[in-house]
Image (spheres, rainbow, N blue to C red):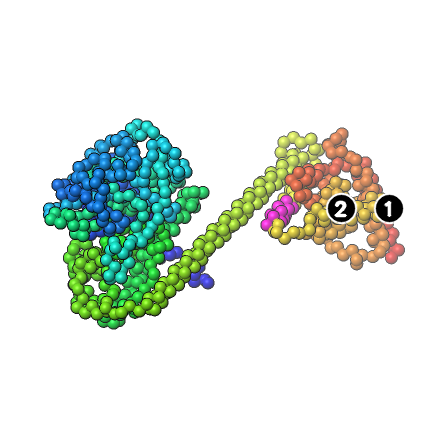
């Protein structure tokens, strides 16, 4: 695969957004451009969704809540400000209250007051002491947004607030009952341990003014249930959304009190410190502002009440756990956070694919589409795979429009994470604005054009293709903009077709199979991710082992180099080249060659050390394949040498010819340089006493050695010479180095044999010392050697003469 290797650098990616806000953008400008249109919509009866998406520590919470400086209030407090500025004087009496998603019911009498009071917040109905908490919280709300929208003065408005969080795939009510110290049914980790330290003034509770008693929250996970058909118009077949059963919706009558209430909710949100963000949101927080609008003339008719919702979602940040180093509970949270965000992305992807399929069908059939044919091509959007998407499902398939704010942190997050966020945004951008209900009826081309114009005319999209928005996603629903912009179809016969239960059952079966397929794919993806993680860990361990091994080898080599240096310095000392050595100076014609010999031998030591080092490293690398122990070979070799020595001693009553000391013999290690030993043994065979008096370099000169071709008499003569040499060696044994010898009447005889390194550094050192050892021979010994040499020559001559 050479081509794939060559193209390792990915091509640059270009992402398009409807608007990019630089870091210097003020919170006011940001709110005005992103959220204010949604606020206007919700006051006019149109639902909306806004969510912030991005990696952890990218500023999502800051965007929603704001900072502590003046003027840095986020979009949530500004939204509340604008709503209450706009409905000033238009408050309803609150005789009806919202239930579930769109349901209405009569409110209890204590809530039916237009006056702002603790009871009007719904605290009394909850039977809890939230009021105590709120009384301790100062309502210093100077950082307010003064924007006011012009509304129809013929309507009355009541505002209801709910605050939920999705934590570890469970939904909780952040306005749930608060207990001031009474025993709690929840664990501490779920209650007070989760009390955050908010950064924003909007949601922060001053430490000095906090409630004197510990606030313990009793938390209970709430189920997510489908809306009953009575809550919505099911005539067009569009399913109703899902709601968090038991989520409290509290009526608020001023922005200050709404903010105070949200502060209490924020205290119970799961916020913990991670490596990436000291106050990381570990849950998805959903603040829903519900507006009940009724015409003043019909205020007693519940059927005339319009319900609209604006939900602001502060998503937990996606994160790579290896970057944030999360473990334990945080790791589980991260897994659930990433899962829900992934499902959100998959929902977007599926919706986009469905809309493309519909567009293709429309194009191929000239605008007339059979309902069943279109349904066949549509995939099931996997909303139910995550609590977050289940709760938000209504915004995507039902009514309202959605705005996604993408937060990018260019500094401390990786390329991959930001790239993933961008891809998600690009995906969301391609989700079209075509209302799902339009699928069920034939839409003439002229009507499509009209619909496009109306979308562009609203000033919410100026794209050349109005149905392709960037970042901002608008999805029409039954009462949504897409439906409002459409005109009734001229020929809505398709809707009147009888429903075939078998076909519906088959569709259900297909949906089930698709869900199973998706789950299998998810399962495979999870297994693959886990396998990759394991392989990475294994590779890391392997790399660490190799690193340790190379470090050991490096240290060993350093030691060996030090030893070599010591040996060289020793030799230089002994030869008198540097310093005043106790060793006798050599005669002038011998010194250079002796030094050369010393250095050669030191180099031999170095080579053998390297050989040993290499073999050590190789043996470490190949430790998986056991090889025969070199020590065992060494022992065997020593045994063989001792046997040979004993045999020769017994045979000739003389020590074996060798210039090596016994230590050297016993310490020699069999190695691949065995042939070198044989070579040196040959040299010893050729050695004659008269060569001992020659300068050493002459012995280094290559000499023809073919012992087999030599005549027997010559070998006999050499045997005699060998005996002499052995005798000489025997006599030199026991002589000590540098002791009691006059420097003037001595010569230096260097050991000729190579030594081999031992397996340990200590033995190596010992070897080098042995190499640098000089055997000093007195003049008497030399004379005896010379006589022996003369005898050997005479013998040779007589043998030659005889031959
Ligand atoms: N525009 C900004 N100006 C000043 N400070 C900012 C801005 N955006 C973010 N910050 C600061 O960066 C830090 C992280 O921001 P924030 O907590 O909002 O990140 P986050 O995306 O919500 O993280 P998480 O997903 O982990 O909760 C905070 O201290 C916040 O005050």
Mark 2 crowdedness (10 Å alpha carbons): few <14, some 14-19, many ≥20:
some
Task: Tell me where residue 536 appears, x and y as whole percent.
Answer: 48, 51
Q: Residues within 10 Å of mark 1 (few under 14, many from 20)?
A: few
> At 28% from the left edge and 58% from the top edge, which residue is drawn?
239
Q: Nearer the viewer, residue 639 or 530?
A: 530
Which residue is nearer to you in this view: 742 or 250? 250
Which residue carries the number 2 mark? 638
* Residue appearing at x 68%, y 40% in the figure: 763
In this rendering, the label closer to the viewer, 1 or 2 = 2
From the top left corner, tell me how far across and down residue 20 is, in percent. Answer: 25, 49
- Residue drawn 69% across the image and 51% down it: 628
Residue nearer the viewer, 271 or 230: 230
Q: Which residues are magenta?
A: 608-621
Q: Is residue 259 visible?
A: no
Q: What residue is at 79 percent from the left and 35 percent from the top? A: 734
Residue 609 visible? The answer is yes
| Mark 1–mark 2 distance (CA, rounded to whole Å) | 18 Å
User: Which percent across, then down, holds residue 46?
Assistant: 20, 52
Quadrant where the C terminus is found in the figure: bottom right
Position of 197 relative to 395 (above/below): above
Q: Is residue 609 magenta?
A: yes
In the image, 659: left or right of 115? right
Q: Position of residue 622 (x, y in %)?
A: 61, 51
- Check if residue 483 falls in the magenta segment: no
Q: Could you tell me what secondary structure mostly forms the magenta stretch?
A: helix
SS at mark 1 in the image: helix
Q: Is mark 1 within 8 Å of ligand 1?
A: no
Mark linked to residue 650: 1
Tell me which numbered mark, 1 or 2, is placed earlier along the sequence. Answer: 2
- Left or right: 795 with respect to 494? right
């Amino acid at each position: 695969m050479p081509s794939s290797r060559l193209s390792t650098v990915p091509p640059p990616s270009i992402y398009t957004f409807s608007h990019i806000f630089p870091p210097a953008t003020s919170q006011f400008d940001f709110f005005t451009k992103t959220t204010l249109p949604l606020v206007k919509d919700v006051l006019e009866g149109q639902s909306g969704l806004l969510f912030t998406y991005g990696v952890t520590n990218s500023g999502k919470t800051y965007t929603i809540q704001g900072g502590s400086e003046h003027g840095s209030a986020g979009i949530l407090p500004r939204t509340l400000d604008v709503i209450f500025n706009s409905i000033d004087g238009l408050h309803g009496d609150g005789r009806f209250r919202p239930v579930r998603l769109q349901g209405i019911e009569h409110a209890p009498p204590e809530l039916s007051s237009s006056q702002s009071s603790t009871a009007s917040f719904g605290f009394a109905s909850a039977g809890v002491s939230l009021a105590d908490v709120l009384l301790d919280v100062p309502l210093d709300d100077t950082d307010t947004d003064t924007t006011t929208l012009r509304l129809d003065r013929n309507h009355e408005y009541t505002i209801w607030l709910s605050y939920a969080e999705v934590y570890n795939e469970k939904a909780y009510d952040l306005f749930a009952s608060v207990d001031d110290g009474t025993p709690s049914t929840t664990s501490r980790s779920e209650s007070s341990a989760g009390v955050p330290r908010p950064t924003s003034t909007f949601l922060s509770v001053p430490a000095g003014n906090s409630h004197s008693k510990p606030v313990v929250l009793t938390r209970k996970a709430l189920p997510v249930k489908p809306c009953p058909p009575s809550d919505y118009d099911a005539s067009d077949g569009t399913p109703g959304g899902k709601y968090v059963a038991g989520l409290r919706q509290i009526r608020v009558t001023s922005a200050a009190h709404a903010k105070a209430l949200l502060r209490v909710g924020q205290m119970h949100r799961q916020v913990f410190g991670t490596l990436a963000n000291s106050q990381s949101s570990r849950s998805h927080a959903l603040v829903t502002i519900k507006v009940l609008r009724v015409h003043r003339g019909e205020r007693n008719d519940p059927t005339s009440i319009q319900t609209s919702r604006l939900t602001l979602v502060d998503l937990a940040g996606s994160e790579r756990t290896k970057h944030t180093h999360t473990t334990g509970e945080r790791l589980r949270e991260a897994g659930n956070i990433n899962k829900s965000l992934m499902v959100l992305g998959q929902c977007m992807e599926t919706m986009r694919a469905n809309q493309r399929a519909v567009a293709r069908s429309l194009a191929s059939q000239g605008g007339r589409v059979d309902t069943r044919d279109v349904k066949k091509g549509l995939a099931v959007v996997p909303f139910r795979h995550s609590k977050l998407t289940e709760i938000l499902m209504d915004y995507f398939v039902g009514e309202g429009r959605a705005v996604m704010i993408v937060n990018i942190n260019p500094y401390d997050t990786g390329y991959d994470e930001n790239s993933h966020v961008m891809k998600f945004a690009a995906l969301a951008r391609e989700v079209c604005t075509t209302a799902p209900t339009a699928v069920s009826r034939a839409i003439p081309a002229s009507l499509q054009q009209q619909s496009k114009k109306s979308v562009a005319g609203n000033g919410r999209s100026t794209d050349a293709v109005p149905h392709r928005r960037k970042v901002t996603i608008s999805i029409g629903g039954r009462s949504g903009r897409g439906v409002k912009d459409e005109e009734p179809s001229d020929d809505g016969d398709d809707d009147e077709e009888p429903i075939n239960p078998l076909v519906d059952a088959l569709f259900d079966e297909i949906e089930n199979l698709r869900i199973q397929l998706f789950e299998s794919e998810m399962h495979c993806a999870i297994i693959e991710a886990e396998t990759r993680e394991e392989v990475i860990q294994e590779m890391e361990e392997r790399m660490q082992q190799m690193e340790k091994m190379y470090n050991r080898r490096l240290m060993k080599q350093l030691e060996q180099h030090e030893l070599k240096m010591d040996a060289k310095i020793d030799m230089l000392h002994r030869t008198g080249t540097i310093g005043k050595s106790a060793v006798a100076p050599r005669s002038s014609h011998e010194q250079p060659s002796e030094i050369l010999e010393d250095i050669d031998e030191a180099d031999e030591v170095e080579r053998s050390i390297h050989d040993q080092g290499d073999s050590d490293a190789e043996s470490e690398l190949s430790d998986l394949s056991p090889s025969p122990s070199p020590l065992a070979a060494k022992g065997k070799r020593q045994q063989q040498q001792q046997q040979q020595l004993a045999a020769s001693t017994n045979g000739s009553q003389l020590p074996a010819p060798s210039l090596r000391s016994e230590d050297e013999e016993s310490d020699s290690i069999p190695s691949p340089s065995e042939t070198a030993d044989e070579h040196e043994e040959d040299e010893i065979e050729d050695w004659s006493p008269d060569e001992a008096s020659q300068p050493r370099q002459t012995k280094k000169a290559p000499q023809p050695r073919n012992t087999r071709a030599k005549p027997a008499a010559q070998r006999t003569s050499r045997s005699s010479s060998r005996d002499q040499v052995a005798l000489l060696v025997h006599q030199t044994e026991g002589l000590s180095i540098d002791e009691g010898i006059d420097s003037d009447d001595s010569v230096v005889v260097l050991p000729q044999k190579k030594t081999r390194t031992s397996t340990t550094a200590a033995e190596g050192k010992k070897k080098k010392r042995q190499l640098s050892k000089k055997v000093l021979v007195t003049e008497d010994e030399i004379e005896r050697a010379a006589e022996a040499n003369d005898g050997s020559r005479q013998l040779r001559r007589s043998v030659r003469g005889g031959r």
